[in-house]
Image (cartoon, grey):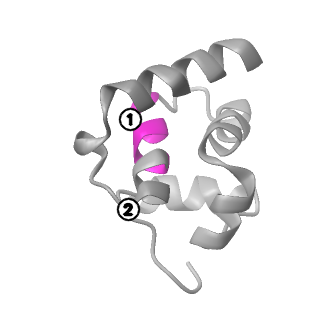
Amino acid sequence: MKNKKFRNIGPISEQWLLEIGIENLDKLKEAGSIQAYLEIRKNHPEANKALLWALIGSLLNLDWRDIPTEIKEKALLAINEKE
């Protein structure tokens, strides 16, 4: 990845982000974690909520395990509305 490395993102998720044109944290901020997750799932239905938590954690600069439950619940509601 160019510029800043993503927190919580491993090599496979990094490749998936590159496939949708997200090569750095600024691009992820522009797209948003929900939209990035949904775009990745179009080509990789095996992507699960762990990826969503990793993306959110990257934007919040948190370990994915430290994301507050309230934020996770809001993210899941947003996904359900868009799917």
Residue 42 % position (x, y): 73, 31
Which quarter of the rendered picture does the N terminus lie within? bottom right
Q: Can residue 83 be seen here? A: no
Disc ID at residue 29:
none
Q: Which residue is mark 2?
A: 61
Residue at the location (60% across, 53% down)? 16
The local secondary structure at tag 1 comes to: helix
Q: Which residue is mark 1?
A: 50
**Crowd tier of the residue under label 2, counting other residues whose Cα lies within 10 Å: few below 14, some 14–19, many 20 or above:** some
78 relative to 75 in the view: left or right: right
**Can you say whether 55 is above or below 42 in the image?**
below
46 relative to 17 in the view: left or right: left
Picture quadrant where residue 6 is located: bottom left
User: In terms of depth relative to the viewer, which is nearer, 19 or 66?
Assistant: 66
Residue at the location (73% across, 53% down)? 31
**Can you say whether 83 is above or below 56 in the image?**
above
Which quarter of the rendered picture does the C terminus lie within? top right
Task: Residue 13: say if magenta.
Answer: no
